[in-house]
Amino acid sequence: MKAPPKIDGPAVPTPREIYERLDRYVIGQARAKRAVAIAAYSHVKRCAQRRRERRSLLKKSNILLIGPTGSGKTHLARNLAEILSVPFTVVDATEYTEAGYYGKDVEVMVAELLFKTDHSIEETQRGIIFIDEIDKIARRSQGGRTGAGGRDIGGEGVQQALLKLLEGREIFVPLNVTQHWNKHDFVQVDTSDILFICAGTFSDLHVAGGRAVGFGSTGEARTGRRRISQRDLLEFGMLAELLGRLPVVVELEALRPRELRAILTEPPDSLTREYRDLLALDGIDLAFSEGALDEIVRYAIDKGVGARGLRAIIEEVLAEILFEAPERRGRKASVDRRYVQRRLQTLDASSLRED
Ligand SMILES: Nc1ncnc2c1ncn2[C@@H]1O[C@H](COP(=O)(O)OP(=O)(O)OP(=O)(O)O)[C@@H](O)[C@H]1O
Ligand SMILES: [Mg+2]
């Protein structure tokens, strides 16, 4: 392999290298991984140029991830931060309000990152902030798009407030996240080099004329569907100014059965490895049959939880084995399809949606 290019000191991974490292942990989503790898590389180049020349004409590569629940939006962003060795925090857009209203000011998002870095302003300024549920702060005035159409919870105001964070400005960040109404203690943070990754399911996104754009689980809907356009997002209730600051729009697909299957076994931190290691500490040799894995995947697909539900499903499948493990030292625990079916009969699917 060729030596990675040097941009201002430390070696920067190329898009291909970023992609390949993402690929080990994020299954499927090839297009999303490529797009994110390119955006991340551009971002790093832009930051380096700004350091060298004190300015940059390159636009900031903030990212909007759109995809169904459990498709890997948060997972992809978290792994990207790991690869770039930058601090990372996840915030929920619905917890924020426009300044002056009850709730958190958007500056607190940066405070969360500051907290993650032990209050290192320098580290914070090169971090990634993942803003989840961005679709839940869509403007609601346009004709009752959702059932909550009449209720105005200030989504537009929060979008407005986000603009100054996303475009990169010096802002004042409260030091004490829990008592942010005490404005005495704050620090100045430059958000120019903070990469913002916004994410949402946009699950009720429709185009004019009634044809839905969304995430069908059937093969046809996956391949035949139109890409989500800026116009769709505007109609959904996102502000043009906000979309303008999210130039990289990336769509993730609902994961297919064989991808869920791969998630169970392939990544270095896969669930089956994790539980095998856990039980090995009790001297138990855990093994899943092929049928058992298929059954777990079938259940996850059935309940529409994507990869998100896999951990809770496995936890339930293994509950008895985990409970008795210390008393069964030195034995083998073989999990087959019948065993999985029996264990899952009583599982309440609503418990699978939690984090
Ligand atoms: N493509 C994937 N490859 C490997 N693991 C994945 C993938 N997608 C999801 N996972 C696993 O499932 C868990 C949940 O996924 P994640 O939180 O990224 O979903 P999401 O798309 O953000 O969903 P939501 O909209 O519900 O937040 C992750 O912690 C990860 O372990
Ligand atoms: Mg998520």
Image (spheres, rainbow, N blue to C red):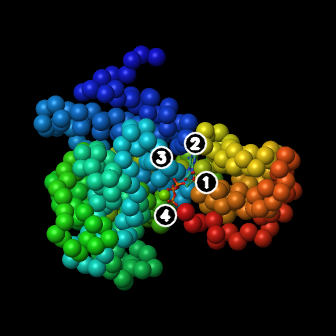
Gap between marks 4 and 2, in whole Å? 22 Å
- Of labels 3 and 4, the one closer to you: 3
> How far across and down, in percent of the image, does residue 219 sit?
63, 49
Disc 1 residue: CB within 8 Å of ligand 1: yes
The residue located at (50%, 31%) in the rendering is 20
Secondary structure beneath dot 3 equals helix
Residues at badges 3 and 4 in contact (C-beta under 8 Å)? Answer: no
> How far across and down, in percent of the image, does residue 228 sit?
42, 53
Secondary structure beneath dot 4 equals loop
The residue identified by callout 2 is 27
Q: Locate residue 342: give its quadrant.
A: bottom right
Gap between marks 1 and 4, in whole Å? 17 Å
The residue identified by callout 1 is 307
Disc 3 residue: CB within 8 Å of ligand 1: yes
The residue located at (65%, 56%) in the rendering is 310
Q: Which of pointers 1 and 4 lies earlier in the amino acid sequence?
A: 4
Q: Locate residue 81: give its quadrant.
A: top left
| Nearer to us in this view, 163 or 92 | 92
Q: Quadrant of the C terminus?
A: bottom right
